[in-house]
Image: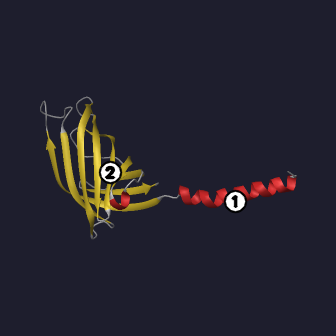
Amino acid sequence: MSLKKSVTVLLSVGLAVAIVAPASAATNTESYFLKRNSRQVLDLGITGTSVGDMAFATGSMSKQRGGADAGTYNFRGITVAVAIPGGRENRDSLMQLNLKTGLILMEKIISVPAGALPDLTDTYPITGGTGAYAGVRGTMVFSVLSDSEYKVELHFSR
């Protein structure tokens, strides 16, 4: 094959890859504001923070802070490790966002002040979904706005 044909073939292949690559690598982003409506804690084992304690929360979701209803969310946390008194604990944390077009699941171990609410921005892996979110993957960035308000940014890569 001549040099001219080789260069033409390589440029053609490179152009095809350049046209296809951005479409397959594209991510979609959605943001929601969460408002906690209820929280319950099951203190199992010894009194105070201990392995096996469970925390549950539910609330509403909106596209804008204080905006119209876009769905609900559920949280479940199980304490899996406790540091020295007054330190942080690790919780197996499951988040479920219930939207009108399907639900999205995220799960990870988070570190929180012992016996308290989350206080740090954290990134969860998206582990699955249903409906319009069936088979979705990506990450959720969870940010604390107040004791009962949070912001989540979903970054999807299908």
Q: Nearer the viewer, residue 117 or 141?
A: 141
| Residue plotted at (13% across, 37% down) | 43
Q: Earlier in the sequence, mark 1 or mark 2?
A: 1
Instruction: Classify 10 Å Cα crowding around label 2: few (below 14), some (14-19), many (20 and above).
Output: many
Along the line of sight, the residue nearer the viewer: 71 or 41:
71
Give the residue at x 40% y 56%: 154
Is the residue marked by circle 1 packed among few (<14), some (14-19), or many (20+) residues within 10 Å? few
Residue 132 is situated, as x and y percent measured from the top left of the image, at 36, 61
Label disc, if present, on residue 75 of the rendered structure = none
> Which amino acid is tagged 1?
Leu
Residue 126, image x, y percentages: 38, 49
Q: Is residue 62 above or below residue 137?
A: below
The quarter of the displayed image where residue 72 is located? bottom left
Q: Is residue 122 visible?
A: no
Q: Give the alpha-carbon distance from disc 1 to disc 2, as whole Å.
A: 37 Å
- 15, 119: nearer the viewer: 15
Q: Which residue is mark 1?
A: 15
- Residue 68, quarter of picture: bottom left
Residue drawn at (19%, 32%) of the image: 50
Q: Is residue 34 above or below residue 45?
A: below
| Position in image of residue 75 (x %, y %) | 24, 49
Q: Secondary structure at mark 2?
A: strand
- The count of marks equals 2
- Residue type, numbered disc 2: Leu
Name, please, the residue furthest toward the front: 1
Q: Name the residue beneath numbered marker 2.
A: 105
Label 1 secondary element: helix
Task: Confirm whether residue 27 shows in the render.
Answer: yes
Residue sitting at the far bottom: 68
Which-is-in-front pick, marks 1 and 2? 1
Q: Is residue 92 above or below residue 22?
A: above
